Image (tube, grey):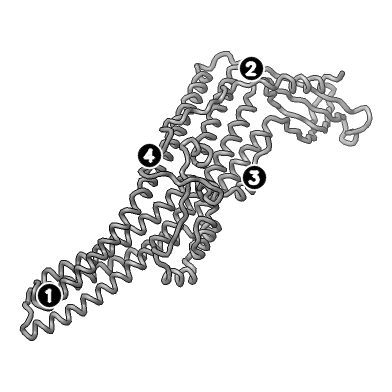
Amino acid sequence: MPLAPLALALCALLGGCSMIPAYQRPAAPVAGQFPTLKADVAQTAGNKAAADLRWQDYFSDPALRRLIALALDNNRDLRVSVLNIEQARAALQIARANQLPAVNGVISGSRTPNTSGGTTSVYTGGLMVSAWEIDFFGRLQALKEQAQAQYLATAEARKAAQISLVATVANAWLALVADEELLDLSKRTLATREDSLKLTRLRFEQGSASELDLRQAESLVESARATLAQQVRQRAQDENALVLVLGQGLPDDARQALRQTRLNQATLPEVPVGLPSELLIKRPDIRQAEQSLIAANANIGAARAAFFPTISLTTGIGSASSSLSGLFKSGSWGYTMSPQLSVPIFNAGRTQAGVETAQAARDIAVAQYEKAIQSAFREVADALAGRDTLGDQLQAQQALVKATARQTELSDLRYRNGVASYLDWLDAQRSLFTAQQALVQTRLSQLQTQVTLYKVLGGGWTDTVVAAQPKPNP
């Protein structure tokens, strides 16, 4: 039997050694249940879990859905995450290629003086495998598994980036809707106070109002004007934030829809929370942390393999002739084989330090994985606390606005009849404006909390997108 095929078969047979430690998923360092103040929403056929609910189905506002689609197409951070996947895929392909021999076509020639005073010519041509490392102790296999886990971690990071982007666009849009409401409220309040100032000035000129009443009315107008300027600035800044995540300017149809949209028209479905253990498979950032842990674990195997000999093979098959025209002719063919065994003897502890470095990196990855779980648990718990309390807060705020509005009407009536002072009327006006502003902010907080809960439960990424995601070959 020829030596070359025998050597290749032997190498393939012996190349199954692995120094990678057996991987075990760390236990989740969180409670078995989320802390809730109210009963969880039951999961039914019509009430899917957040991770199974497409963002197109969760958000019913057509303008918002179009903005999310634009952001998914144009957002630069999302583009970077996609390109990171391509980079990781290429690195995985390199790691795979390192396990196989690199075959090169080689043609060479040399002319050297001989002892008779003439010149000896040697020409060779053929195929050559140069310094192919035979992966007897699994070093290259460990590096390939590390690259594959890093690729999968990068793919999970891309999913996490999309989930975050969907929620960011939704919250930015809701903030912009709230800005429009607050801006409209500030304009109406300013107009009302300017009318009151005109009346107070007229009464002052007629001697039926004091200068104190006039100055108080002026201060009320200027306060409303300052609030209006603040709202204009806040709206511009929130629009700039939305434009940044969109990756382009705000479309005209979105601006038109913004003028017609109110927070009390927005409805978002309730989603069941489930158990903390379900986050391990539904949150891409947790899966990313676990793949990073698997990659660090595989790197220990590569570091351990450095303790063992490295076997490499250089071989070639081709033709040799003393003249260029004689290459590749009958009788000029042959092959060469040059195996090499390199045994580590002394390197001042470098190899052991490499193993310790890899083990420390694995321990760091374990801590990061556990921190990712704890952070996810805290995010869900915070969102649940907001969901369970903001509904009651909104009802109370609505009742407060209704009561304050009635108080303002009565204060105005009492002031016009001379029963109450102008200061009482001013206080009622301030209280009403503050209560109306707080109502808008509470509505905004409630909706944004629902969006955040959808996000932290893994919503915003769908199976159809996952199916389109390319996967590495085993």
**351 or 464, nearer to the observer:** 464
Q: Residues within 10 Å of mark 1 (few under 14, many from 20)?
A: some
Q: Can residue 5 be seen from the camera position used here?
A: yes
Q: Residues within 10 Å of mark 2 (few under 14, many from 20)?
A: some
For mark 2, what is the residue? Answer: 309
Q: Can you tell which mark lies on residue 470?
A: 3
* Quarter of the figure with residue 372: top left
Cα separation between marks 2 and 1 = 98 Å
* Quarter of the figure with residue 378: top left
Mark toward the start of the polypeptide (2 vs 1): 2
Mark toward the start of the polypeptide (4 vs 1): 4
Cα separation between marks 1 and 3 = 73 Å
The quadrant of the rendering that contains the N terminus is top right
Is 91 situated left or right of 280 in this image?
Answer: right
Q: Amino acid at mark 3?
A: Pro
Q: Amino acid at mark 2?
A: Pro
Q: Amino acid at mark 1?
A: Tyr
**17 or 474, nearer to the observer:** 474
Mark toward the start of the polypeptide (3 vs 4): 4
Percent across and percent down for residue 251 are 49, 68
Q: Amino acid at mark 4?
A: Pro
For mark 4, what is the residue? Answer: 35
Q: Nearer the viewer, mark 3 or mark 4?
A: 4
For mark 1, what is the residue? Answer: 415
Answer above or below: position of 80 versus 141: below
Q: Can residue 80 be seen from the camera position used here?
A: no
Percent across and percent down for residue 423 are 11, 69
